[in-house]
Amino acid sequence: MTSAVKYILEMNPSAELIEVTGWVRTRRDSKGISFLEINDGSTIKNLQVVIDESLEDFEKILDTINTGCSLQVKGILSESEGKGQRVELQAREVSVPGEAPSDYVLQKKRHTFEFLREIAHLRPRTNTFGAVARVRSAMSFAIHSFFNERDFVYVHTPIITGSDCEGAGEMFQVSTIDYEKKLKEKSGIDFSEDFFGKKASLTVSGQLEGESYALALKKIYTFGPTFRAENSNTSRHLAEFWMVEPEMAFCDINGNMDTAEEFIKYILSAVLEKCPDDMDFFNERIQKGVADNLQSIISSSFERINYTDAVKELEKAADSFEFPVSWGIDLQSEHEKYLTEKVYERPVIITDYPKDIKAFYMKQNDDGKTVRAMDVLVPRLGEIIGGSEREADHDLLKKRIEASGLNPEDYWWYLDLRRFGSVPHSGFGLGFERLIQFVTGMQNIRDVIPFPRTVNSLEF
């Protein structure tokens, strides 16, 4: 029976024959003996396999083994005499399903993350990206567990949409129109001739559709890919990324904040519990103290302040910022980090933002100037969650849509939700890759998603 390396490393020495499969990370030869480090992706740790000249066809087998080749080994697990491992596998049978030539790019030499992005199909074989993949998987499972334990319904909202949730217009178009032909003919684009009979785009959020299910099932969440055609070539932006978006009926802004804080703590706790070896790696190789930072957030209470008070705190240190501070601005990352790291030294939830810098669907406050928005900020990163209590009044929502330069007719069904049994309801969105960055300490968002989609980058 084949066992994963992570389990073999926990076994006690035994005379029983066990089998392991994986890929060779390193090879070290001595007289009449070869030491192989193999890894199968189940753990960041390698298993040492010892092949000696007593093995049939010893020299012939060694001729086929290079770094990167796949390996299938049957052997006896024994105590290791070397440093760095408790057990090792004494090979009795060895086969090489797939060889790797000498020009295999992932040799002992350490490569930059920039270079590894150019070989995204191979980078999962490195320690860093294997660890990122396992942490991402554990976090995904924890997200579903969190909502399932609280009776949320998982809803698959559409990827193709006819409405712009954020009202920013930075959307990728989906079309079957032959644009090259139209350009040659110098004819205009008539979207009534298109596949859907109207202009269609890739979604920037599943929120609007999610609200329709929340107003029937009470508590729902979406978790899937979203797309932004934002021409930002930075370490914080992707054109395709994953969003977690719960929506809750009969829930105001306070309930929304409670859920967001509980959610963050749950995910961080799950990672520390499920991925201790990978988190040790990130702590040692990527960012010192990253695990302790997560534990600190889990054990802290999030500070809750309104936007006006946040601006007052920032104005006290206005000279420290590149971007000037005044009431009405959209807070920048430097402002968010200052609040979490210098002023409150903990995560912060800011509420009641100016309505002019927030989306049309947010509930207006009685002052006529602010909306019941909330942003969750964490040290080192800044904003990690954005949400709000949604506008539940039909007429007020319609006015906000018009004031945002959007056509109410495009949102007829969304307005309908306010006509038929409307209730106070709230929700938030969390950019999954941003959270993975925070958990792992990885500096570039392109390194926490398997195949990054960015400006001028569609290689794989």
Image (cartoon, rainbow, N blue to C red):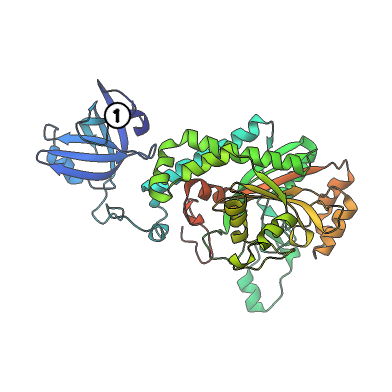
Q: Residue 327 at what x, y percent from top left? A: 74, 63
The x, y position of residue 26, in whole percent, is 25, 45
Furthest residue toward front:
316
Quadrant of residue 253 in the image? top right
- Residue shown at the point (49%, 33%) measured from the top left: 273
**Image location of residue 400, percent across then percent down:** 83, 59
Classify residue 447 as left or right of residue 107: right
Question: The residue under label 1 is which amino acid type?
Answer: Glu
Q: Is residue 195 visible?
A: no
Asked whether 456 or 148 is in front, the reply is 148
Evaluate whether residue 280 shows in this view: yes
Q: Measured along the vertical axis of the image, is residue 262 above or below residue 310? A: above
Along the line of sight, the residue nearer the viewer: 443 or 407: 443
Residue at image location 88% in from the left, 51% down from the top:
394
Q: Identify residue for label 1.
A: 19
Q: Is residue 151 left or right of residue 100?
A: right
Vertically, is 109 above or below 4?
A: below
Q: Residue sitting at 38 percent across and 37 percent down?
A: 43
- Image position of 18 with respect to 53: above or below: above
- Quadrant where the N terminus lies? top left
